[in-house]
Image: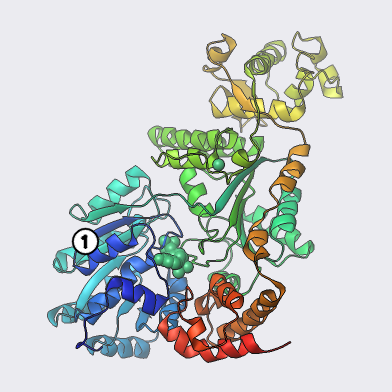
Amino acid sequence: MPTTATPPTPLDILGQVFGYSDFRGPQQAIVEHVVQGGDALVLMPTGGGKSLCYQIPAIARQNAGHGVTVVISPLIALMHDQVGALHEAGVSAAFLNSTQTQEESSALEKQLLRNELTLLYAAPERINTPRMKGLLGSLHERGQLSLFALDEAHCVSQWGHDFRPEYRSLSLLHETFPDVPRIALTATADALTRQDMIERLKLEDAREFVSSFDRPNIRYTIVEKTNATHQLLRFIESEHAGEAGIVYCQSRKRVEEVAGLLEDAGLKAMAYHAGLDSSLRQQRQDRFLREEGMVMVATIAFGMGIDKPDVRFVAHLDMPKNIEGYYQETGRAGRDGLPANAWMAYGLQDVVNQRRMIDTSEAASEEFKQVMRGKLDALLSLAEDTRCRRVALLHYFGEDSLPCGNCDNCLNPPKVWDATEAARKMLSCIYRVQQASGISFGAGHLMDILRGKATEKVLQHGHDKLSTFGIGADLAEVQWRGVLRQLIAKGMVRVDPDAFNTLQLLPDARQVLKGEVSVMLREQAAGASADRRKKTTKTSAKGLAEASLNAGALERLARLKAWRAEVAREHNLPAFVIFHDATLRAIAERAPQSRADLEGISGMGAKKLEAYGQEVLRVCRTES
Ligand code: ADP
Ligand code: ZN
C-alpha cells in the first residue's frame, strides 16, 4: 500500500473500491468511529448496508498499518461468496472454516503473518481453537490485529431467534485482546435481545448506532387467505413474472407441496428446509444466488445472511410467529433499493395454529408463553390494522412515522365496520351450543348455525332450534371468520387441539358479552378484493424498475445481463457480485462510448472498471 500521498478517506474508499458516491444513513458516522478505534454496536435493518460499516474501516485501518480485520460470522455457507465479492472489488480477503484442508489453512496462516490480508472471515467455533488463539496472539504481538467485527451478533442471545452457543465464548476475544476495537452488528431490534447481547459480549462501553428500521422501497400487503396457493400464483404471475423471490411456509411438508405446485405452473421453484441434507441445501442456496428468476419456497431455516440484492418479493403463505420474524424475513426483499413487495396471506387457521403451538409447547415456562402470546397478538393487529402498515410496523420498533403511500392500506384504504354485535352473536352461539349439547363444536359448524344453514349436522343435533340459529344471516362467511380470528387473538375463544379443534369460551369473553369492549374490523369484500387490488397497484416492481428504459437501453441491458451471467459462471460467483442489476441498468441507460462514460456509475469501483470496462464497452457497442 502506498504511504506517501495522503491516505484515502472513508468516502474515497467508498467511491474507489465500492463505486458508491454517498454513505447511507448512519454509515459514515459508524465508519469514522471505528476507523478511529472506537467500539460500536450497530443496529440496522436487513439490507441497510451493514457490511460496509466494517469493510471500509478494515481497509482504512489496514492502509494505516494496523493489520487484518477478523470478521466472525455464523454464515459458513456464504463465506465463499462474501470473500469473492471482496476480491472482485480488489480487496484482499480470505475465509477460514471447517471445509478447508490442513494445507489451505497453513497457507492462509502464512499469508496472515506476512500481513497480506485486509479481511479474514471465520466461523465462531474456529476462533476458539488453540491453533487460532495462538495465531491471533502472534498477530497481536506484531501489531497486526486491527479490528474484530462480530456479524449477526444477536446469535449470542437465547432471546434472539438464531441462538448459537459458540457465540458465548466470543467475550474471550475482548478479555484476551482488550485493546483491539470491536464492531458488533445485527438487524434484530428487540430490546430484550439487545440488552442480553450487550451484556454477553461486554459491549457496555461501545457506542450504539441505531438506524431507522424503515425500508421505503418495500411495499407491504397483507391479504385474507381464501385459496392461498392460488392467490400466491396470481400474485407472482401478475407482479413478478420471471423475478427472484422467497416464499415462506410453516412446515416442511407444505414447503415441498408449494414448491411442486409452482413448478407445475411453470415457475423456476425449489424447496428448502432443515429436513434436507446439508449438501442439497447448499446446492439450492447456490442456485438461488446464481440463477436468475428463481423462487425459493422455504421454512424460516432459509435466509439468514442471504445478501442477494435483487430478491423482488418475499411472500408469507403462513403467518410468522411475531413481527420481528416477519420484518426480518420481508427485509430480504429489495436490498438493492429498487421496488420490492412483501406479501402475506393469513387466515383463521394461522391464528389457530400459532396459538396452539404456544399453548402446547412443553419446554417453555408460562411466563415465556405469555410473552409469545403478546407478540403473536401484535402481529395479528398488524394484519387486521386499517391504518398504514409501515406506520404500524415502525411503531412496533419504537419509531414514529407518517403514512407511507406505499402499502396496501395507503393505496386502497380499507373500510372498518363495528363488529361488536357480531362478536356477541358469535360468543353467545358458542355458549348456547355448548349448553344445549354438552360438547363443543368447530368453527364451520358454528358459522352454519349463525348463518341459518340447516345442514345435516345442524339438524342431527337439533341446532336449528337454538335461539342463535340464523341470527347472523346478514353476514358472509368471510366476515364471520374475521370476527372469530379476532376473538381467538384476543383470548376470548380457545381452539382446543385435543378435541378436534372445537371452540370454547374463555373468561375474557365476558367483556364482549357484557358490551364492555367493542370490536372493530377491517371490511372484507368477499372475493373481489384481491382482483381489485391487483389492478390499482399494477405499478409493480418490474414495471417501475424497467419502465423508464427505451428500446435501445433495454436491448443493451439484455446483452449486459447475458455477459454478466457468463463472467459469474467463470468466476463461480453469483451474478450480483460482478455487478448489481441497478449498475447494469445505469450502464445500459448511459450507452457508454468510452471508459470515461463508465466512471461515476454507482457500483463501478476502480478495480471493476479496470477489469471489466473494456468488455462492458464492447458489449454495449455490439449491434444485434
Ligand atoms: P445488510 O448486511 O445490512 O443486510 P448489506 O451490507 O448486504 O446489508 O447491504 C445491502 C446492499 O446495499 C448491498 O447490495 C450493498 O452493496 C448496498 N449498499 C450498502 N451501502 C451502500 C451505499 N452507501 N450506497 C449504495 N449501495 C450501498
Ligand atoms: Zn402505508
Residue in the picture at 78% in, 38% down: 528
**Depth check: 511 or 336 in front?**
336
- The residue drawn where x is 44% and y is 35% is 369
* Number of numbered discs overlaid on the protein picture: 1
Q: Which color scheme does this rendered protein use?
A: rainbow
Q: Residue 468, located in which quarter of the rendered image?
A: top right
User: For mark 1, what is the residue?
Assistant: 39
Q: Quadrant of ligand 1?
A: bottom left
Q: Is residue 442 visible?
A: no
Residue 116 is situated, as x and y percent measured from the top left of the image, at 28, 88
Quadrant location of residue 543? Answer: bottom right
Q: Amino acid at mark 1?
A: Asp
Q: Answer left or right for 335 relative to 71.
A: right
- Give the vertical position of 11 relative to 333 (above or below): below
Q: Position of residue 151 (x, y in %)?
A: 35, 64
Q: Is residue 404 left or right of residue 458?
A: left
Residue drawn at 61 percent across, 35 percent down: 352
Measuring from the top left, give residue 357's x and y in whole percent.
54, 40
Reply above or below: 477 against 142: above
Say if residue 534 shows up in the picture.
yes
